[in-house]
Image: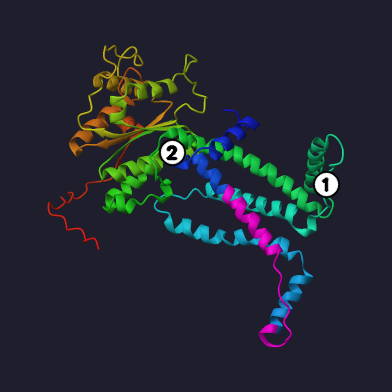
Amino acid sequence: MSHVVFASQVLNHISDSAFGSDELMAYTATYSWLANQMSHATMGFFLAIAIAKIRLPRFRNDSGIQGRLNHVRSFWGKYRCLRYVLPYCVPAIKLPFDVRAVWRRSGAFDVPWDDFVYDKATDLGFWFFGMLLAQVFLTSSCRVGTLNLPTDHAGACWASVYNWVRWVFLRMFVPVVWPPHRAAFLILVVACYLNYEWWTDQKGYFDRSGLPSGWVRVSEYDTSRACPDLGIRKTMEQQTKTYLTTLGGESPRHCVIRGGSATDRTDLAAALGVEFASRRKAVYYFTANKLLERADELDRWKRFAIHDTKGGVSESDSRFPKCVIIDDLPEKFPAPGDPDKQNPDQLVKKSNPYDPSANSQRLFRWFWAHRNQTSTIWVLSCNPEEAEVWLSTIRQYASWEKTATATEAEQTERVLDINLGEIDAEVVPSTNPPALPRTP
């Protein structure tokens, strides 16, 4: 995907966000980001107007509290620049509290402070954009005259449009009263446009991923709740940190998440997938049953990974999967075939496209063929004995060599075992639930 956002793409984003009904479609990450920044610009716009219009009364008594207020009024009137500078200090005051909140919520994994700084810089940019917009158009320091529209001759309509555009251009770009205002406004317009390009492209990776809602960054994942046992938790955290090195451009690793509760396993897998999407690396989330029951989903996944140009995307394309999450791998999932074949990427010929064994074979064929290009996250939903079998099978498929099985050490390094440990037996709900309160 090109890094240049054309006007048509901008208009498409605005059209998709402005028309229709929010109740009839799901919110996308792109829509949420645009709404968030629009709120920042709007709050900055009205905050700048409110502060610029502050008028302090004068009290007759110059002693006591009224005298001090008169001094404040004199100071406010003498240094009129404060009403244009003070709005920019208000959102900056919030930054230390944001840092404290993120620091308190962080867990065993490092906080991505570079992403935090860029996010806050973008927020402040849109805050300042709204403030400058208000000061350029609506404050008295930027007045350049009145608008006179010709209405007494033919063609008055077109002349009015021309005169209005010329008037707006003069107000915005001609340094009549305060040149720094207009220079800063132009700089912020360019900065907001570049931020729009970068962030909407990044949010597109989230929208295409299919990740479940409610995800968190891995830095805010609560390992103490998901893995109460301290010894197992330390091993789990170390394995997770090792897997995150895949984001640094090293040879892709694979991991198996097992143990714990189903919710904690899915949350951890989604958090790892978010780390890929936040770095603009394509990630796709599937459930095992979905892949088995719907062959078209597997075909779509297969099509994403084609290296040539025959209807698919190349490895350099932004849609090429850098990470694939396969959630809820059950105990009775059909076992794959032998990976050591002459043509590992060849599909099994079956008359029924929904045949589970055929789709299972295709799934693992894809994994075998792209194990060196795409990282995979396997979330197991079975008992410990079956989980050990799956772990061994997945490690064999991820072997380094194509025609020979790798050593046990190489398999362990290639496929990481993230074990959340055992959980207590689930409490069976009572067959006699408490009665509901009576209606009045």
- State the residue position of label 1: 174
Relative height, residue 176 to residue 55 (above, below): above
| x 87%, y 38%: residue | 153
Q: From the viewer's perspective, is the residue at label 2 or at label 1 nearer?
A: 2
In the image, farthest residue toward the left:
431
Q: Residues within 10 Å of mark 1 (few under 14, many from 20)?
A: some
Q: In terms of depth relative to the viewer, which is nearer, 161 or 256?
A: 161
Q: CA distance from mark 2 to mark 1?
A: 45 Å
Q: Is residue 155 left or right of residue 342?
A: right
Q: In terms of depth relative to the viewer, which is nearer, 387 or 297?
A: 297
The residue range painted magenta reads: 38-66
Q: In terms of depth relative to the viewer, which is nearer, 335 or 138?
A: 138
Relative height, residue 39 to residue 387 (above, below): below
Mark found first going from the N terminus, 2 or 1: 2
| x 37%, y 20%: residue | 299
Q: Is residue 361 left or right of residue 249?
A: left
- State the residue position of label 2: 24
Q: What is the three-letter code of the residue carrying label 2?
A: Leu
How would you classify the magenta stretch by its main secondary structure? helix
| x 72%, y 61%: residue | 84
| x 71%, y 76%: residue | 57
Residues marked 2 and 1 touching at CB (< 8 Å): no
**The C terminus, quarter of image:** bottom left
Q: Which mark is residue 113?
A: none
Which x, y percent locates residue 419? 28, 42
Q: Quadrant of residue 333?
A: top left
In the image, farthest residue toward the right:
153
> From where the camera sits, is residue 103 visible?
yes
Of helix, strand and loop, which one carries label 1?
loop
